[in-house]
Image (cartoon, grey):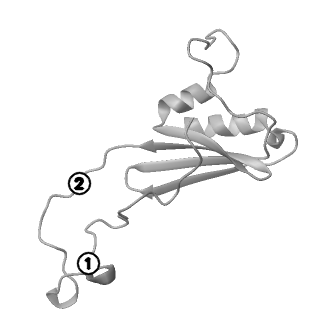
Amino acid sequence: MTCVSELSANAITHSGSGNGGVFIVEVDLPRPGVARIAVTDEGAPTSPCLPAAGRLDLMAEGGRGLAMVAACTNRWGYADAHPGRVVWAEACWPVPVPPPGPPASGPAGRPASGPAGRPASRRPGFSPGPPDWTPGPAA
């Protein structure tokens, strides 16, 4: 929640969204143990950036927001979203792995199967393979 409010505040403070514009907040839970947020704003002349190492002014009134987002998430970044920009962050946490056991059974006691006759996953919503959403490069 803190990262959502920080990225929203940045959209208002540092982009055209704060000058009578709008911004969009998206929250996604693509699979167990992963949460993604994205804030799309109306763009700004500069890119979001972290303070250089050793240059974080702890007495300054601002300038620590993206450092906090970076510290609270596993990765973050931004990408152009013509005519604006999207700033995103992803947080991950461990999830229990089901113990090995007999395959799930389908109707009439037959083993359940997925696409191309492969056994269906034992976890609802499990999707093996690469992530379904790949935002821009992480900073």
Relative depth, front residue between 129 and 114: 129
Residue that mark 1 sits on: 118
Q: Residue furthest bottom?
A: 108
Q: How many marks?
A: 2
Among the 4 quarters of the image, the one containing residue 113: bottom left
In the image shown, does 80 or 20 lie closer to the viewer? 80
133 vs 40, nearest the viewer: 133
Badge 1 amino acid? Arg
The N terminus sits in image quarter: top right
Residue most extreme to the top:
59
| Left or right: 100 as drawn, with respect to 126 | left
Question: Is 87 displayed left or right of 32 in the figure?
Answer: right
Q: Position of residue 103 (x, y in %)?
A: 16, 73
The mark nearer the N terminus, 2 or 1, is 2
Q: Position of residue 51 (x, y in %)?
A: 63, 20
Binning the other alpha carbons within 10 Å of mark 1 as few (below 14), some (14 to 19) or many (20 upward) gives: few
- Kind of residue at badge 2: Val
Q: Nearer the viewer, mark 2 or mark 1?
A: 1
Residue 65: percent from the left, percent from the top? 62, 27
Q: Which mark is residue 43?
A: none
* Residue 17 relative to residue 99: left or right: right
Kindly give the residue lying farthest to the front in the view shown: 137
Residue drawn at x 53%, y 31% is: 70
Report the residue at 11% width, 71% height from top.
102
Pointer 2 local density, CA inside 10 Å: few below 14, some 14–19, many at least 20: few
Say which residue appears at 31% left-offset and 82% top-offset: 116
Q: Residue at x 62, y 22 (%)?
A: 64
Residue highlighted by disc 2: 97
